[in-house]
Amino acid sequence: MPMRVSAERRTLLYSAAIACAAWLAAVLFAFTALGGQFDNNIYDFLFRASPPQPVSSPAVLVVFDERTFQQHGGIRRLRANLASLLDRISGARPRAVAVDVTLADPGDADEDARLAAAFARTPNLVLACEMMPDGSGWQDPVEPFRRHAAALGHVSTLAGPYDEVNRRITLERVAGRERRWALSLEALRLASGAGDILASPADVSVGGRAIPSRWDEGRPLRVRYSESGVPAVSAADLLSGSAADALRDKVVFIGVTAISAAPDRLFTPLSRGLPMAGVAIHAQAFQTMYAGAFLTDAPLGYTLLAALAAALMIAAALSQVLRWQGWALAAAVLLALHILPWFCFRQDVVLSASAPVAAGWLAFLGGGAFRYFFVRRRLEMSEEATRRYQQAFHFVAHEMRTPLTAIQGSSELISRYNLPEAKRRELSQMINAESKRLARMITTFLDVEKLTAGQMELRLSEFSLAELVEACCRRAAPLAERKRILVTSRVPEELRLKADAELLEYAVYNLLTNAVKYSPEETEVTIGAASGNGEVRLWVTDQGIGMDESELKLLFRKFYRTRRAEQSGETGTGIGLSIVRQIVELHEGSIRVESAPGKGSTFTVALPAR
């Protein structure tokens, strides 16, 4: 059954289409470099505008800064100074010591021997290692140093692919066939007195502490950077004999922060243009894991669902809610989308903002354009329909005056004058005929409203289609004779149909009279029928004025009349074909038109053979 989609449902479908298109474009945008950088920028902004609550840990930085190098011989004396430093730190009895200094090459023999002895006296020592540039293996500390280390930890970070900002570190790296855990993770293991690090696809466990870090994503960990950072002590102070007691029961991270000597000064979300030494990043990563204050990424499914929901709400608001309320509701949803990443961040959840925000804005722009063009067009169409309805009403009111005048005049004659019985009978018959004509006009208008509201019910019965067509031809005969038009019926006598005979007669009669009204004199109108493929087809063909493509699209709209029909001089309301289509659709059938200007028209009705 051909369904005529209501304006409200059509608007809803358009809204859904706009929302889905906006959502799809937003998802594609989220997976581009621009979308990724947008997420990174939002993440960095949230870190600076609303930094996470600081956490405490036993981590302490001992740094070789500019002052240390100035007072103690510069970078050339690094290993000798490191040995002296470790002796002082070991005396303070720290929990663990992590040395973020590359010691892959041998140096001065005496200095190396002294440093190796210092390493031997250092409890829970973690030494740094780096992956070979080609990924084939590891650059480990030289053997005299390595043998004293309780663990080796890699010092790799995860710089952003588009901006080199280090928002995360990787807890696990594999080079060749050898796996190494991060320096900060090994320091946590030793400081906790834990055994082996246990790994699952979803997390890493150290001494019963689960650290969310997925294997299929490369074991990343978002570092919970703090404005205050990790407490730091200058190596110069320790070498001068002070501040050692502050390291008791601490986890000490030793590294170089002097700008002139640090090879790994990296940018972070809090850098503001000033890089951070790698050892400080590892110390903050340790602090993040020790406190269990993890920043976890929202599942991708939630992000995509939020984007789709936002697009649907905004598109629906702009297309369904009237006037300013629609704009206000859409703007509120859009504002909520911008606040949502901040709200999630306050709950230690990182939400990818690119897809929801892009979906919201695209739906807002698409819905706004739809509201302006489509809804505006619908308003214009409604105003045009109202105008046509008023014209039709005036026409019908004018037509009603004729039978009313005849009834009034005839009744006055009967009441005022003593007329012969034959004349009185003639006037009574005229009153009766005009009353029936008036009743048919009113019934037609009421039927239009019932059909439009879907309140008309079918009264099905089986009948001969040929007899119904013959009845319509007899009713149309006077009009056809005035124009000397030949009306020919080619409906098989045996063809029967189960339908509402009264409604179908109205439809056939309307098609037939239209064909006669809009055909020139001395032409032919043919009405035929046939059955097959489970349906009965009835057609009416004329040699009339015809219609073009633009007129055919509007032909069945209520109160619509073509330009040629209006210029023909024939009176009409534009209601008839609208009623015909509704009658056909009520029977679960279809109607189509073939026409061309000056070449006539053929209306074909197809009804199911019941």
Image (spheres, helix red, strand yellow):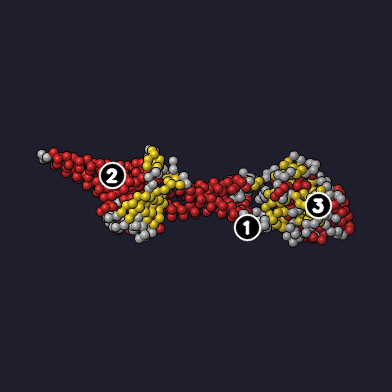
Q: Which mark is residue 130?
A: none
Mark 1 secondary-structure assignment: helix
- Tell me: 332 left or right of 172: left
Q: Name the quadrant containing residue 272.
A: bottom right
Residue type, numbered disc 1: Ala
- Residue shown at 74% from the left, 49% from the top: 171
Residue 117, image x, y percentages: 87, 51
Residue behind mark 2? 441
Q: Kindly report the distance in space between the C-alpha atoms of the residues bearing marks 3 and 1.
A: 32 Å
Query: What is the quadrant of the N terminus in the image?
Result: top left
Residue behind mark 1? 33
Q: For marks 1 and 2, give the one nearer the viewer.
A: 2
- Residue shown at 34% from the left, 41% from the top: 502
Residue behind mark 3? 177
Asked if residue 90 shows in the view, the reply is: no
- In the rendered image of this protein, does residue 155 appear above or below residue 409? below
Q: Earlier in the sequence, mark 1 or mark 2?
A: 1
Mark 2 secondary-structure assignment: helix
- Tell me: 293 left or right of 10: right
Q: Earlier in the sequence, mark 3 or mark 1?
A: 1
- Crowdedness of circle 1 by 10 Å Cα count: few (<14), some, many (20+)? few
Disc 3 + disc 2, Cβ < 8 Å: no
Q: For marks 3 and 2, give the one nearer the viewer.
A: 2
Residue type, numbered disc 3: Arg
Q: Kindly report the distance in space between the C-alpha atoms of the residues bearing marks 1 and 2.
A: 69 Å
- Residue shown at 32% from the left, 42% from the top: 446
Query: What is the quadrant of the C terminus in the image?
Result: top left
Nearer to the camera, 340 or 135: 135
Q: Name the quadrant containing residue 501.
A: top left
Specify the farthest residue to the left: 418
